[in-house]
């Protein structure tokens, strides 16, 4: 049997459109519905926080979903099916949100079901998409593909918030449901057309993973691989560091430097612009380097190290009485975040195929579950550190310094773990020593 040819740039863009579709739907459930619950219905912010947390928690099933696509030998049904479940969840979430102006318990019950479906749909489609991308993209193109797919996901965020935001005014439950249903229909159509036929007949005729292997056995086999286990822990620590800063950077500029809401929003936009610049840089550098894992490892190290240094600078920024170039630091932090994130995803696409054959879906599921849990905990970690720092130091400035120093420590820990990515072959059968017992 002949293997499927590597994807062309057009094929990579097609898979990127699936990520655009996923991003377009998810941003409505985690952003617009959040605002409606808190502002229009004056509900506690804890409610959308718990619902979004459920969306991340259910993604712990990613390894099981990946195993399902391994056994079946095809990823397309999981991508299309995941998109369908995600759309159903998003429409139900919009319906439940519109019901919150009336009896609350039935609305919340429906919202819980909806956000569980959103998480399941994202997990199924996202895991299968990344496995397909890793399997069909030539090694030299993987850094550029990783950056391109992430950027196209952000494009889904931007496009949906820009277009749907105008259609949602003036607010009404019917308008919210109609706009959400329209976005879901367009996203499902886009994603389904983008992935149609991309696996081809070769994938269908290729030998599937051993179907007789139960999921628990497959999971134990993958977790027993030192490289897969170590990379899972790295993804968790790195993405925890990445997300822990999200909820504190904009308030920091307002509280410590007295910036207005408009000024802090522009500062946040500048930082996100830096993220895109960092990702583009990885696409170019990684492509020129032929996608070699050692180069990606160095780029992850550099991104994590730079982010840690910049966070330390922010921790001391308040004492500098405005002497620090805040805009430059935020932009540079965005660049560092973008570099390490894109390089880590590219490395993930290289590592997922290293190990026992027929287990790529389980490995990618492990990596995806670690990322989802880290993102779910990241915002909470940052806010807890902020409150703890305020309590211990008795000052607003001390609270933010505690967050930034703690986050810098996480980035340094991620850098230390990144140093060992792809080095299992150099260590023979010795594995990764004390790292394995760290997870329970």
Image (cartoon, helix red, strand yellow):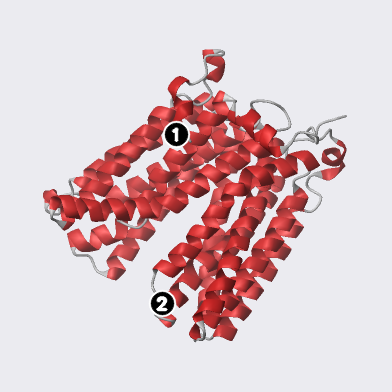
Residue 171's spot in the image, x, y percent?
50, 85
Is residue 432 in view from this perspective? yes
Q: Mark 1 points at which residue?
A: 300
Whether tag 1 and tag 2 are in contact, CB under 8 A, the answer is no
**Secondary element type, mark 2:** loop
Residue 36's spot in the image, x, y percent?
46, 77
Residue 378's spot in the image, x, y percent?
40, 50
Q: Which of 199 and 106 is in front in this view?
A: 106
Q: Which of 344 and 45 is in front in this view?
A: 45
Give whichever of discs 1 and 2 has the lower sequence position.
2
**Residue at the (16%, 50%) spot, across then down:** 392
Would residue 251 be found to the left or right of residue 197 on screen?
A: left
Residue 89, by quadrant, is bottom right
Residue 363's spot in the image, x, y percent?
62, 36
Distance in Å between CA atoms under marks 1 and 2: 41 Å
Judged by depth in the image, the label closer to the viewer, 1 or 2, is: 2
**Secondary element type, mark 1:** helix
**Residue at the (43%, 40%) spot, across then down:** 238
Q: Quadrant of the N terminus?
A: top right
Circle 1 residues within 10 Å: few <14, some 14–19, many ≥20 = many
**Residue at the (43%, 82%) spot, across then down:** 40
**Residue at the (65%, 38%) spot, across then down:** 362
Is residue 169 in view from this perspective? no
Q: Mark 2 points at which residue?
A: 43
């Amino acid at each position: 049997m002949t293997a499927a040819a590597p994807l062309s740039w057009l094929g990579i863009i097609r898979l990127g459109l699936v990520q655009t579709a996923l991003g377009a739907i998810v941003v409505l459930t985690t952003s617009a519905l959040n605002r409606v619950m808190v502002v229009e219905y004056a509900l506690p912010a804890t409610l959308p926080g718990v619902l979004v947390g459920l969306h991340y928690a259910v993604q712990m099933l990613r390894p099981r979903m990946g195993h399902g696509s391994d056994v079946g030998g095809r990823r397309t049904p999981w991508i299309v099916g995941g998109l369908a479940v995600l759309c159903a969840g998003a429409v139900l979430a919009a319906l439940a949100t519109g019901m919150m102006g009336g009896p609350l318990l039935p609305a919340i019950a429906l919202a819980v079901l909806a956000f569980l479906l959103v998480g399941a749909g994202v997990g199924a489609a996202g895991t299968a998409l990344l496995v397909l991308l890793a399997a069909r993209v030539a090694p030299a193109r993987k850094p550029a593909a990783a950056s391109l797919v992430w950027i196209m996901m952000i494009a889904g965020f931007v496009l949906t918030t820009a277009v749907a935001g105008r259609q949602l005014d003036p607010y009404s439950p019917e308008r919210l449901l109609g706009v959400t249903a329209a976005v879901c229909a367009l996203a499902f159509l886009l994603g389904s057309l983008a992935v149609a036929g991309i696996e081809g007949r070769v994938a269908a005729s290729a030998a599937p993973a051993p179907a007789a292997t139960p999921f628990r056995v497959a999971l134990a086999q993958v977790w027993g691989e030192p490289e897969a286990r170590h990379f899972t822990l790295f993804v968790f620590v790195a993405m925890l560091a990445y997300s822990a800063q999200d909820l504190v950077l904009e308030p920091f500029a307002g509280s410590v430097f007295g910036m207005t809401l408009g000024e802090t929003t522009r500062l946040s936009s500048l930082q996100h612009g830096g993220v895109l610049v960092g990702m583009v840089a990885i696409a170019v550098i990684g492509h020129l380097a032929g996608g070699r894992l050692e180069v990606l490892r160095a780029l992850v190290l550099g991104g994590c190290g730079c982010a840690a240094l910049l966070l330390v600078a922010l921790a001391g920024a308040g004492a500098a009485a405005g002497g620090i170039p805040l805009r430059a630091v935020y932009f540079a932090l965005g660049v560092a975040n973008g570099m390490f994130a894109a390089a880590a995803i590219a490395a993930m696409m290289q590592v997922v195929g290293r190990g026992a054959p027929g287990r790529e879906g389980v490995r990618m599921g492990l990596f995806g579950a670690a990322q989802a849990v880290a993102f779910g905990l990241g915002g909470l970690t940052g806010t807890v550190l902020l409150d703890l720092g305020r309590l211990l130091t008795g000052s607003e400035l001390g609270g933010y310094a505690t967050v930034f120093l703690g986050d810098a420590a996480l980035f340094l820990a991620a850098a230390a773990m990144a140093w060992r990515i792809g080095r299992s072959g150099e260590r023979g059968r010795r594995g990764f020593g004390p790292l394995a017992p760290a997870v329970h």
